[in-house]
Image (spheres, grey):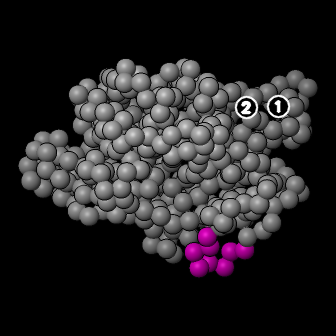
Amino acid sequence: MPAPAWLRPILLGLLVSGLAASDARFKPVHEAEFYSKLDGRLVRCELCPRHCIIAPGGRGVCRVRENSDGKLYSVVYARPCTIGKEPIEKAPFFHFLPGQTRITLATAGCNQSCKYCQNWEISQSRPEELPGLDLPPDSVVAIAEREGAPIICLTYSEPVVFFEYTCAIARRARECGIRTAVVTGGYINPAPMETLCSLVDAVKIDLKGFTKEFYSDVCGSELAPVLAACRIAARSGTHLELVNLVVPARNDDTLDIRRMCQWVLFNLGDSVPLHFTRFSPAYRLRDAPATPVATLETAADIAREVGLKHVYVGNVPGHELESTFCPGCDSLVIGRRGYTVTANNIVNGRCRFCGARIAGVWE
């Protein structure tokens, strides 16, 4: 299957050549972290809750971690299938360096199978099926430096499955004064999540629903490990934001939304930004309707009633709840329309009008 045009690597004016993918090119190149060797040259991957047991020559559910003669390797280390340049608001991150540019990067693969995935062409593909680049961490950082982008964002598919590459980029970026952010489904074991949070500056977790049934039926995964990852991120001090994509008749029950918001309040605090995002038909849910804006507004009302301070409505350009308001005086502190910042009234992390502290990373 040919890759859609938006997946063709954006080279940003650098002399980097895209290479056609092939089975030979994707031989194991970088030994994985977080795995155990078993008898008979089997390995058990311990990166995510699936704990895949992989025979020699086989790969895990994510399609990108391979057993080669009794050792586990990443076959996508330094081999992204797409790289681009976008506003940080598109992630979305609303409390992390607003108005700044991010370099975006992804490889093939994912450890979930969400029926509504908007990036299914890469998340549900083997790396051999996509075009790609040979791009080591140093080169990724060099692109960010040359483009004047203060953030590198690992996104689109699932940075968990290219964990070693993500961590190497974050280490090198930190040495060069560039921030890193991760957009993830949070389906990861505690130890690697702690490592990730020690290296990156911001994490956006897709809290896709709040029932075991939704995660099982729609995402092919489990809720509990995602909640554990959220707790680890909040405890680590790494900047954290949450997104809940609201799918009609799937995860829009108001009682479940209230339970989710209460969980966020009591486990993560009242200042974690929570985005309720509009669903558009995609992948295996093309027959489902788009989310009514009123449903998103109801969810936002529930979150604010529960006591969350920073609640947003996403994928509705021009909506009032795209913007950030001071929890102290209710003044507009960050104005937004779509991915554009229209006003910034935060000074030294505080509201310009009343001096209340606004949780986030602002400079």
Q: Nearer the viewer, residue 20 or 228?
A: 20
Earlier sequence position, callout 2 versus callout 1 = 2
Question: In the picture shown, does residue 134 fall above or below 319?
Answer: below
For numbered disc 1, what is the local secondary structure? Answer: strand
Rendered location of residue 37, percent (x, y) = 80, 29
Question: In the picture shown, does residue 344 fall above or below 200?
Answer: below
Q: Nearer the viewer, residue 145 or 322?
A: 322
Query: Residue at coordinates 51% horizontally, 75% vertically from top-left?
Result: 146
Rendered location of residue 72, percent (x, y) = 79, 39
Outermost residue, left direction?
Answer: 354
Q: Nearer the viewer, residue 217 or 186?
A: 217
Rendered location of residue 79, percent (x, y) = 71, 58
Query: Residue at coordinates 37% horizontally, 24% vertically from top-left?
Result: 254
Q: Amino acid at mark 1?
A: Ile
Query: Residue at coordinates 56% horizontally, 65% vertically from top-left?
Result: 84
Q: Are marks 2 and 1 in contact (CB under 8 Å)?
A: yes
Q: Which residue is label 1 attached to?
A: 54
Whether residue 123 appears in magenta in the rendering, the answer is no
Whether residue 16 appears in magenta in the rendering, the answer is yes
* Residue 26: mark in rendering: none
Query: Residue at coordinates 68% horizontally, 51% vertically from top-left?
Result: 122
Q: What is the magenta range?
A: 10-17
For numbered disc 2, what is the local secondary structure? Answer: strand
Rendered location of residue 195, percent (x, y) = 54, 39
Q: Which residue is label 2 attached to?
A: 45
Q: Amino acid at mark 2?
A: Cys
